[in-house]
Image (cartoon, helix red, strand yellow):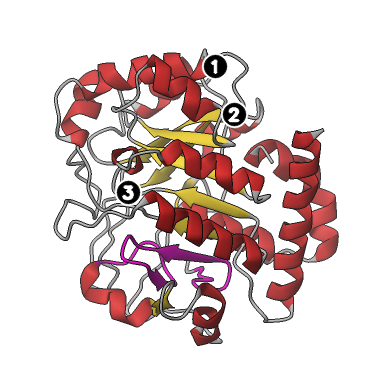
């Protein structure tokens, strides 16, 4: 009964965001909360390498969840940095669900023992573990030897957790280092987890002179193969004629998704580098509140020098919300299956 009530609330909140989006009175569908910039790894593709360390206390995190819930948002994603460096982070997932929010956790999976896995699997609606290839490849990308073996244990602990509530999935970032692993990796892991999401590596320094790392891998077949079994969090957003599309622009920064940093600052885009943050700054949770900060969202997207976004958590949301009502109704079962909602 509790799960049914939460699902109904999620769909109603999603519908509310959709109506506001179409009427240009925006309520974000997703709020990404980064309670810390600290991380115990040094992944090659990541923008957070402890350059400006901050950590949010759990009480402030609860306060943000309260504000997000009052706003009418449907979903939060707790990310970082590495969020499991924040004590009692599991309580944030439980608290968010009590507030009728769908709660996701993004983690590198290296700080979870069997006992903590049980708490996490029963605190969040979904848990995404970063795993970017087999042992040699993943350890090279993460910058820490032994990471792969630790993540495998974490996946075993999470998927085997008694009465687990959360869907357990893998985030796989396609880079020049792992493109040859991708096909075999998906074949071996697709039946060990509830879903696999993969996306091309992209730069957090969004400007017209940035050269993207193009893996040169046709992931269309992989996406289709996984989608048929309901195992993929990806669609064809990045695919044009069977190849990766690095030119398409799609952005609803501040309209459908926002990001909150450990210091309480609110940004329209979750994926900008520190030197570009001023262009995307909306306000402060503590000084302005989320609702007032959203009044600063521009009528057009924040495209200053940006050559296009390839982050699934943003572009996929935009793609769906840009559908007309009849398209949503027609594709509802497909979307429900693909995104495990």
Rendering coords of residue 87 (x, y %) = 33, 39
Which corner quadrant holds the C terminus?
top right
Q: Which residue is mark 2?
A: 231
Q: Is residue 226 visible?
A: yes
Residue positioned 65% across, 51% down in the render:
99
Please tell me whether residue 162 belongs to the stretch shown in magenta.
Answer: no
Q: Earlier in the sequence, mark 3 or mark 2?
A: 3
User: What secondary structure is marked by label 3?
Assistant: loop
User: What secondary structure is marked by label 2?
Assistant: loop
Residue positioned 40% across, 62% down in the render:
270
* Crowdedness near tag 1: few (<14), some (14–19) or many (≥20) residues, C-alpha within 10 Å: few
Span of residues in magenta: 250-273
Residue 246: quadrant of the picture: bottom left
In terms of secondary structure, what is the magenta stretch mainly?
loop
Rendering coords of residue 57 (x, y %) = 34, 53
Q: Which residue is mark 3?
A: 201
Cα separation, mark 3 vs mark 1, equals 24 Å
Residue positioned 31% across, 34% down in the render:
179
Residue 258 falls left or right of residue 337? left
User: What secondary structure is marked by label 1?
Assistant: loop
Do the numbered discs 1 and 2 sit on residues whose CB atoms are within 8 Å?
A: yes
Please tell me whether residue 266 belongs to the stretch shown in magenta.
Answer: yes
Q: Earlier in the sequence, mark 1 or mark 2?
A: 1
Cα separation, mark 3 vs mark 2, equals 21 Å
Q: Is residue 187 above or below residue 206?
A: above
Residue positioned 48% across, 29% down in the render:
120
Q: Earlier in the sequence, mark 3 or mark 1?
A: 1
Q: Which residue is mark 1?
A: 191
Residue 2 falls left or right of residue 244? right
Between 80 and 284, the residue placed more toward the observer is 284
Between 293 and 15, the residue placed more toward the observer is 293
Do the numbered discs 3 and 2 sit on residues whose CB atoms are within 8 Å?
A: no
């Amino acid at each position: 009964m509790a799960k049914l009530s939460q699902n109904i609330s999620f769909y109603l909140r999603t519908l509310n965001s959709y109506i506001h989006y179409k009427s240009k009175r925006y309520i974000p569908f997703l709020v990404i909360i980064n309670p810390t910039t600290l991380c115990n790894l040094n992944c090659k593709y990541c923008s957070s390498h402890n350059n400006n360390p901050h950590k949010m206390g759990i009480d402030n995190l609860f306060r943000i969840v309260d504000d997000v819930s009052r706003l009418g948002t449907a979903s939060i994603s707790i990310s970082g940095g590495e969020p499991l460096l924040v004590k009692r982070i599991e309580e944030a997932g439980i608290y968010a669900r009590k507030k009728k929010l769908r709660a996701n956790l993004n983690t590198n999976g290296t700080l979870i023992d069997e006992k903590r896995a049980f708490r996490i699997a029963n605190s969040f609606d979904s848990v995404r573990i970063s795993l970017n290839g087999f042992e040699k490849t993943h350890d090279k990308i993460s910058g820490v030897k032994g990471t792969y073996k630790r993540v495998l244990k974490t996946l075993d602990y999470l998927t085997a957790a008694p009465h687990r509530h959360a869907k357990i999935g893998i985030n796989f970032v396609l880079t020049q280092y792992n493109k040859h692993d991708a096909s075999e990796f998906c074949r071996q892991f697709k039946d060990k987890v509830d879903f696999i999401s993969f996306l091309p590596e992209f730069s957090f320094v969004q400007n017209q002179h940035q050269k993207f790392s193009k893996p040169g891998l046709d992931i269309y077949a992989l996406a289709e193969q996984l989608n048929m079994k309901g195992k993929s969090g990806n669609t064809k957003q990045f695919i044009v004629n069977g190849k990766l599309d690095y030119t398409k622009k799609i952005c609803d920064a501040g309209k459908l998704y926002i990001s909150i940093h450990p210091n309480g600052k609110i940004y329209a885009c979750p994926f900008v580098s520190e030197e570009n943050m001023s262009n995307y700054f909306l306000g402060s949770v503590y000084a302005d509140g989320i609702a007032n900060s959203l009044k600063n969202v521009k009528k057009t997207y924040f495209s200053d020098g940006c050559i296009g976004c390839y982050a699934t958590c943003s572009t996929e949301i935009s793609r769906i919300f840009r559908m007309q009502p009849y398209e949503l109704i027609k594709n509802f079962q497909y979307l429900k299956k693909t995104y495990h909602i």
